[in-house]
Image (cartoon, rainbow, N blue to C red):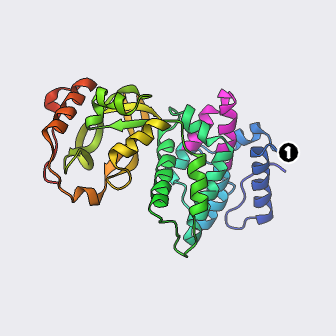
Amino acid sequence: MKLKRLNGDNPNFAELYKMLEMMENLLDEEDTDLTLEEVCSFQETDGSFSLLDTTKIPNEAVIDFINQPTHICISILMKEYLKGSTQVKKGLIKGLNYTFQTGLRGHGYEAEKILIRQLKVFIKGGLLEFLENKKEICPRFHCMIHNIIHQYNYNLINNKTLGPWREDYQEEWEKLAMELKPKTRFYLAYGSNMNKEQMFNRCPDAKVVGKSYLEDWELTMPSHANIEPAKGKKTPVLIWEISERDEKNLDRYEGYPNSYDKKELVISVGEKELSAMAYVMTVKRKSSKWKVGEEYLAAIIQGYEDAGFEKAEFKFREDI
């Protein structure tokens, strides 16, 4: 049986499920007539691997027969790319961009179960290795995955693991968070952690990647440095590459998750885009209104100079 797109108005479900099985078998490296070449040639111009000839179908069908086969095929390409098959790179990037644009959304009360299933498909394709070693390939996809895991970790720490029907996702989220824990990641510093002496003391494995401006975010100072979305504003930042050990140290210094939560953001550094983790102050901490210390402000100013910014660029909104 060959891959083909079926009539979306009256599909043959037996054929649809057979083609999905063929894709899964290729991903799992089990016996199948499906080849990598056939998968690559089946990709549509929008990056998807739809099994139906139209998108004018119920949302459930979009998830099951457009998005699901797309994720399986992207995982096949990801696995091949990680093995060194550079010829699949263009199709992989197109597929990842499609996935970012549509999101890993599910439908109805099954939404979280579908999301978990999709993550497991990407894990089969080598998602952790991809997140760690191919950070330059579709940073928006990296950002999406990291934000999902950030949310899982936050929910686990705060014992918020129940779904809308009281189903408990603790075990699944813990497993996924462990399986997708990177050994290194990019970290976006915007306050005193631009200060190199302080940062190297806290994070001995840290390496400077480069300076940049975080567009449409503004520096605020409720008690310590924070960033808030603000259209048209920009905030000087320094991007670091940190280790898992460094991140644990930062979690302690930043008071994660009570004082600061984690948010993944896409930022341009030179000619490249990167997905980087930032600490964003929690609502509870912002309401504390602690007085900003002069020593702390001096450390931030030194950080601006260390990162290569002008001292005069240190500006923040005070009415937060």
Q: Quadrant of residue 18?
A: bottom right
Q: Is residue 270 visible?
A: no
User: In x, y percent, where is residue 153?
Assistant: 48, 54
285 to 306, vertically: above or below: below
**20 horizontally vs 75: left or right:** right
**What residue is drawn where x is 28% and y is 38%?**
190
Q: Is residue 290 visible?
A: yes
**What residue is drawn where x is 25% and y is 48%?**
231
User: In x, y percent, where is residue 116?
Assistant: 60, 58
Q: Quadrant of residue 225?
A: top left
121 to 94, vertically: above or below: below
**243 horizontally vs 259: left or right:** right
**What residue is drawn where x is 81% and y is 48%?**
2
| Neighbours of disc 1 within 10 Å: few (<14), some (14-19), many (20+) | few
Image quarter (top left, top right, bottom left or bottom right) of the C terminus:
bottom left
**What residue is drawn where x is 55% and y is 49%?**
99
Main secondary structure type of the part rendered in magenta? helix
Seen from the viewer's position, the closer of residues 285 and 2 is: 285
Residue 90 shown in magenta: yes
Q: How many marks?
A: 1
Residue 183 shown in magenta: no
Q: Which residue is mark 1?
A: 33
**25 horizontally vs 167: left or right:** right
User: In x, y percent, where is residue 103?
Assistant: 52, 54
Seen from the viewer's position, the closer of residues 97 and 151 is: 151
User: In x, y percent, where is residue 235?
Assistant: 25, 38
Amino acid at dot 1: Asp
What's drawn in magenta, residue-wise?
72-96
**232 horizontally vs 312: left or right:** right
